[in-house]
Image (cartoon, helix red, strand yellow):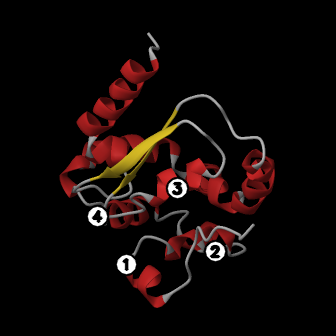
């Protein structure tokens, strides 16, 4: 079986702004030195690249900064990226014995889009998904109504209540 390509290291991927930062948390001591103490600057820069910039206002950034502050907050938030290769190894067996519960897998059209559904389909068999138009990386913040619509449609389709 061919290995799936999740992270593309190409000029297009790097300039598009959607994937290059995945490498940042892997660099030893870089987040600690560059982000800690500059959390607000980092977060406002990061969120400014969302498709729907109005979705993440100053009040929302303040709330996120409540937990994304100091070394523990920054490293805790970036831990999911630092653990990406461990996570891949842990989920690899699911390709043979796929998850059976219904899953909604959505991506913002201007971020990972349909790639999210394709990645989840590698480990699950009952996947409903799609690409949310006019949306970047932050689906719940940028397009909450669309997210709820997809989830409610899946619940109705599966007979869950």
First in sequence, mark 1 or 2: give its number.
1
CA distance for labels 1 and 4 = 14 Å
First in sequence, mark 3 or 2: give its number.
2
Q: Of all residues shown, which one is farthest toward the left?
A: 54
Badge nearest the viewer, 3 or 4: 3
In the rendered structure, are the residues bearing label 2 and label 4 in contact, judged by CB atoms less than 8 Å apart?
A: no
Reading the image, the residue beneath label 3 is 118
Badge nearest the viewer, 3 or 2: 3
First in sequence, mark 2 or 4: give its number.
2
Dot 3: element? helix
Reading the image, the residue beneath label 2 is 30
Would residue 51 appear left or right of 154 to someone viewing this image? Answer: left
Reading the image, the residue beneath label 1 is 16
CA distance for labels 3 and 1 = 20 Å
Dot 4: element? loop
CA distance for labels 2 and 4 = 21 Å
Reading the image, the residue beneath label 4 is 48
CA distance for labels 3 and 4 = 27 Å
């Amino acid at each position: 079986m061919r290995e799936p390509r999740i992270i593309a290291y190409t000029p297009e991927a790097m300039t598009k702004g959607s994937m290059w930062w995945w490498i940042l948390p892997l660099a030893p001591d870089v987040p600690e030195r560059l982000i800690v103490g500059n959390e607000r600057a980092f977060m406002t820069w990061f969120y400014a690249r969302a498709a729907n910039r109005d979705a993440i206002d100053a009040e929302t950034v303040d709330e996120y900064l409540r937990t994304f502050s100091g070394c523990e907050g920054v490293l805790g938030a970036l831990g999911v990226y630092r653990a990406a290769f461990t996570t891949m190894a842990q989920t690899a067996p699911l390709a043979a014995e796929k998850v059976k519960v219904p899953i909604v897998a959505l991506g913002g059209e201007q971020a990972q889009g349909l790639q999210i559904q394709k990645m989840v389909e590698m480990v699950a068999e009952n996947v409903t998904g799609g690409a949310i138009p006019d949306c970047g990386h932050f689906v719940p913040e940028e397009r909450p109504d669309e997210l709820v619509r997809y989830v409610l449609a899946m619940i109705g389709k599966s007979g869950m209540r």
